[in-house]
Amino acid sequence: MNYLRHVGKYFIMLRQVFRKPQKWSVFREMLFREIEDLGLKSLGIIAFISFFVGGVIAIQTALNVDNPFIPKYLIGFATKQSMILEFAPTFMSVILAGKVGSYISSSIGTMRVTEQIDALEVMGINSLNYLVLPKIIATIFFYPLLISLAMFLGIYGGYVAGTLTDLFYSEDYLYGIRLDFDPYYIQYALIKTVVFAFVIATIPAYHGYYVKGGSLEVGRASTQAVVWTSVVIILLNYFLTQMLLG
Amino acid sequence: MIEVTDLYKEFKGVPVLKGVSTTFEKGVTSMIIGQSGSGKTVFLKCLVGLHVPDRGIISFDGRKHTELDIKEHRLLRQEIGMVFQGGALYDSLTVEENIMFPLKMFADQPFSEMLDRVNFVLKRVNLENANKKFPAELSGGMQKRVSIARAIVMNPKYLFCDEPNSGLDPNTATVIDNLIKEITEEYQIITVINSHDMNSVMEIGEKIIFLKDGVKEWEGSNKEIFITENEAVVNFVYSSNLFRKVREAYLKETK
Ligand SMILES: Nc1ncnc2c1ncn2[C@@H]1O[C@H](COP(=O)(O)OP(=O)(O)O)[C@@H](O)[C@H]1O
Ligand SMILES: [Mg+2]
């Protein structure tokens, strides 16, 4: 029952968020700030994780296909498929849910408990529109780039793993990643990314915006935000996969 | 003039304001006093529209919250300045950006004009050379000054201050009090201040409203509060021994 109330309140919040910005110049300024805070600042961690995950997938696949009848190019193929279909869009989004989600909910939550949101409202500013809309736009436009980079680096990580070990040949790997290439898979992954980006921007914003109390509650809200964002991403991943690939 | 009639507000069935009526005049610093938890903040937030009262009428020079549409509401809010208890400065913005924020949002001026106005109000609150600092780098008193500067940058007709000198040392508190009073007279603003600090009340309380358990228990000036017989007020005001002695001496003298 309580869950339903939250869901309802979340959608009512979104109605306030999706209004025309009161001043475009201020909106633009906020947007650039958010692209930096929510996007550029996550570049390093996403690059690092995807590169090594790609390497590990390649190595593990190689170790598992020691049957001479299974062609070695499958290693490249498997690395590519898992990076593009799941590891980049879903796994990286869950990581972003942790990193960016906690940042969003604690920064908005702090603004709430220190009356900064009241200060915005008193000035006649739609605080939800002002605070949340730039975050949504920043994430849904920037995360597809970030996730594409993750796909690329993951596949490249697999290649590097091959050259550093003698588990498989680079030529086989390169052949494998070009095998059966279907652009629809990329499209599918990017559609998922955009949906997850929206979730990463809005669910933590909801938890932060409606926090009551002090810093302890802000911390709690932030934990809740990360948990729920991850849960919703995983559930949506299931439904989107069934819808788009099933 | 702000007219408040029979203001009633409850949270989840617990009444916090139980029918408060009063008026606030131009150029006068009015004060709401009362113990912690007596409903001062809730009262102020009802006035500015952050809380929606369950009953009662609030009229800003004839404009009532309940009768305004969204656009008229926004316009009214641009005439309101508010100083929050903790300052409520935007901590990701510098002092200059904080004060310029309302201008950027609502005034169509070139940057240089906005900057002039920011420097003017900063000077008015005696805070110069702090433009590029962030709120976290300022002392409590400086934060309050920035907060006041931000509240007056749009030339408000109405100024609300929630415990503007809580957490400040007595000297700084007096400076802030006097600053608010000066600004009120200079620009003929309707000013309402929440306080539980008797020093401020004596210093600048031209009109005082004493709230107790959500009811207006007493109303008068800082001259009258000295000699009132109202028991609740006497208990609140003279909670310190020093003040009680001063009162006795004062009453003896005037007899
Ligand atoms: N948003 C709220 N929800 C529920 N209760 C509240 C809320 N705001 C204030 N109260 C309650 O109203 C009473 C008066 O609070 P307040 O106006 O902050 O007192 P003060 O006079 O110290 O400013 C307190 O008992 C407080 O718990
Ligand atoms: Mg208070």
Image (tube, rainbow, N blue to C red):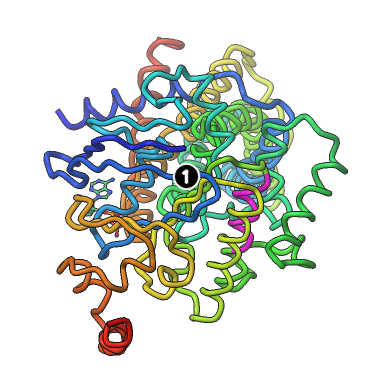
Chain under disc 1? B
Residue B6 in the image: state x and y as whole percent.
23, 36
The quarter of the image holding the C terminus of chain A is top left
Percent coordinates x, y for residue A129 in the rendering: 53, 28
- Front-most of B122 and B182? B182
Residue displayed at 76% across by 62% down: B123
- Provide the major secondary structure of the magenta segment: helix
Identify the residue shown where x is 62% and y is 39%. Answer: A154
* In this picture, residue B53 sits left or right of residue A236: left
| Quadrant where the N terminus of chain A is found in the figure | top left
* Residue A63 showing in the rendered view: no
Q: Which residue does the image show at 31% across and 68% down from the upper left? A: B225
- The region drawn magenta spans B145-153
Front-lying residue, A191 or A39: A39
Q: Residue A84, percent across and down?
A: 57, 27
Residue B121 is at least partly visible in this image? yes
Residue sitting at 38 percent across and 66 percent down? Answer: B222
What SS does tag 1 mark? loop
| Dot 1 amino acid type | Glu
Q: Is residue B219 above or below residue A198?
A: below
Compared across the picture, whether B231 is left or right of B109 comes to left
Mark 1 sits on what residue? B25
